[in-house]
Amino acid sequence: MLDTDTVFGASYRSEIDLDLSGDADFTVPTSSVYVNGLGLFLDTGINAGVTLPASLSFSIAHNVDKITYLADITWTGWSSFEELRIVYDNPLQPDTVTTESWEDTLRYSVGFDYQYSDKMVLRSGIAFDETPVPSAELRTARTPGNDRTWLSFGLSYTIDDQSSVDVGYSHLFIDDAQINNTLETSVPELNATLTGTYEASVDILSVQWNRKF
């Protein structure tokens, strides 16, 4: 706290390593069924390791009369996501590897809370969120996103000493995302390149009821 009207905050979240497992169920076209005789594309167990990134945030809130001004900057260490590798229990089935080579990102946001009445607080804000995908060649159909701008509105309403309601709405403006991704494979018959443009936007509506006991 810098003074009674200004509060500064910081938070850090470490990387989280996930070990995932499941089953692969292959459907092979009749024209390519010969690969089964080679021990390939047979139903088998799979596993993969994924590291979720670390993040570091700095924020500040400054109160002037009925308005609290807010600002935040968040770094996310997406460079830890170098590849997505699926390993098969079938020793004859090569690993499925997708090179990611993502980059660290920054997210910037500003907003305000307005104390409209004793019971109601109005909120609004805008944020710019960088994409970690570095190029069209490394963008895949799994993650076709791009830089996005968040525009958000909301309110909190106090019902009584024990209950309150929060309502929020966000619209995400997402830049068109170019893709020119070639499938990484050791099987020549599977060679293919996905080329095109993704257009997207997102609407998020949330309602939360809070109860103190």
Image: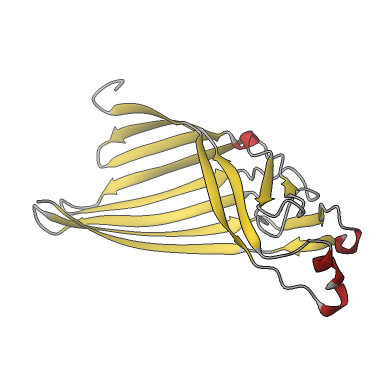
Q: Nearer the viewer, residue 152 or 91?
A: 91
- Could you tell me residue 77's position as x and y percent? 58, 33
Q: Residue at x 78, y 61 (%)?
A: 40
- Residue 200 lies left or right of residue 160; in this view the side is right
- Could you tell me residue 69's position as x and y percent? 36, 38
For the view shown, which residue lies furthest in the top direction? 2
Q: Nearer the viewer, residue 123 or 198?
A: 198
For the view shown, which residue lies furthest in the bottom direction? 30
- Residue 180 lies left or right of residue 70; in this view the side is right
- Residue 167 lies left or right of residue 210; in this view the side is right
Q: Quadrant of the N terminus?
A: top left
* Image vertical order of residue 166 relative to residue 6, above or below: below
Q: Nearer the viewer, residue 93 or 7?
A: 93
Q: Residue at x 45, y 41 (%)?
A: 110
Q: Nearer the viewer, residue 210 or 70?
A: 210
- Could you tell me residue 177's position as x and y percent? 72, 56
The part of the image, by quadrant, that contains residue 189 is bottom right
For the view shown, which residue lies furthest in the right direction? 188
* Image vertical order of residue 57 relative to residue 93, above or below: above
- The colour mode here is secondary structure
Q: Residue at x 71, y 44 (%)?
A: 100
